[in-house]
Image (cartoon, rainbow, N blue to C red):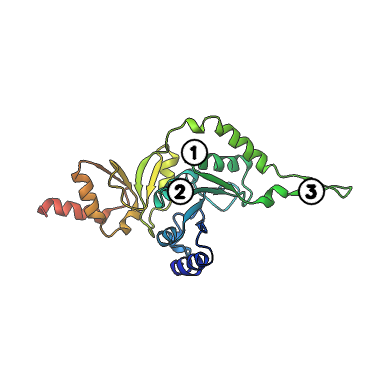
Amino acid sequence: MKEVGENLVVKNAKSVNPKINLIIKPPNWYEQYQFSGYNLEAQSQAFDMVYTGTETRDPENTTMHLQPDQSYGIMRYFEHIKPGKFGGGWVDPGARPTLNRYTEQLEDTLFAKPKEITLWSYGNALETLRQADGTTTATSILYADAGDTFQKLDSFLGKLGQPDGVAAYKPYHSSGEMYLHNYVGMIGVPMDLYPEFPDERGTIFLAESAKFDPDLVSKIWKHLNEDKTIIKSFRAFTRTITVIRCCCRCGA
């Protein structure tokens, strides 16, 4: 996919129109990109901008059991992946979530203060029901609901500060304790996801996925020696903690 993005898409498009603005929109698979054909690191650099899907669906009525916090958390992740060039969130009514769930997806996306939000697709606004006399009546209320949601949030969204939370490190192409960040977010501790180790932040949360960084132990040591804080999940670092304890004992 790196080859496809850089050469088949970007190189050819810019050879025809150097002024073109190319946006890649990965879906809401932040734990699954490396398993599903996406190279988030390379593709985000090759394209001019990135967008992301922020759907979390309805776990009661669909097959997707995503924590609603992901609609917010994945936005923060992409903001750190391509600062200043992150376009926003993309919501669709796929799998027909309940209207409340659709509304919440919009709200959670907007709380991350995106530059834009995209409602996919126009066809959803054109759903109709044929009447007995042969005429059709528009039946979709999705975008009426979206308009009501936007109007409500417009009344106070501009008064909020910048989104914040506990810095959490999830390297590119990593996996482990999937969706733990969203579970933590759902208990009231918002996660601010980074693809690079955010050493400038005072406190960093590490899930098992952080072990994909081969230099993780040295980064932890540096952070701790600067009198900063590391929060780790229980499963995350049995081997890492063993290494740290060994170093403490032998003085290495």
Location of residue 43 in the rendering, given as x and y in whole percent from the top left corner: 44, 61
On residue 129, which mark appears? 3
Looking at the rendered image, the disc whose residue lies closer to the viewer, 3 or 1, is: 1
Task: Relative to 89, say whether 39 is above or below.
Answer: below
Q: Earlier in the sequence, mark 2 or mark 1?
A: 2
Amino acid at pointer 3: Leu
Location of residue 189 in the rendering, given as x and y in whole percent from the top left corner: 39, 38
Q: Describe residue 37's horizontal placement relative to residue 152 as left or right.
A: left
How far apart are labels 2 and 1 at the CA level?
12 Å
Q: Is residue 37 something that shows in the picture?
A: yes
Which residue lies at the image location 44% right of the left edge and 66% below the top edge? 2
Judging depth in this view, the residue of 189 and 76 nearest the camera is 76
- Quarter of the picture containing the C terminus is bottom left
User: Circle 2 is placed at which residue position?
Assistant: 74
Q: Is residue 55 something that shows in the picture?
A: no
Q: Earlier in the sequence, mark 3 or mark 1?
A: 1
Amino acid at pointer 1: Phe
Task: Relative to 48, say whether 150 is above or below.
Answer: above
User: Circle 1 is placed at which residue position?
Assistant: 111
How far apart are labels 3 and 1 at the CA level?
35 Å
Q: Judging from the image, what secondary structure is the residue with disc 1 in? A: helix
Location of residue 238 in the rendering, given as x and y in whole percent from the top left corner: 27, 54
Q: Quadrant of residue 101?
A: top right
Q: Quadrant of residue 203?
A: top left
Q: Earlier in the sequence, mark 3 or mark 2?
A: 2
The answer to whether the residue labelled 3 contacts the one labelled 1, judged by CB atoms less than 8 Å apart, is: no
Task: Relative to 175, say whether 77 is above or below.
Answer: above
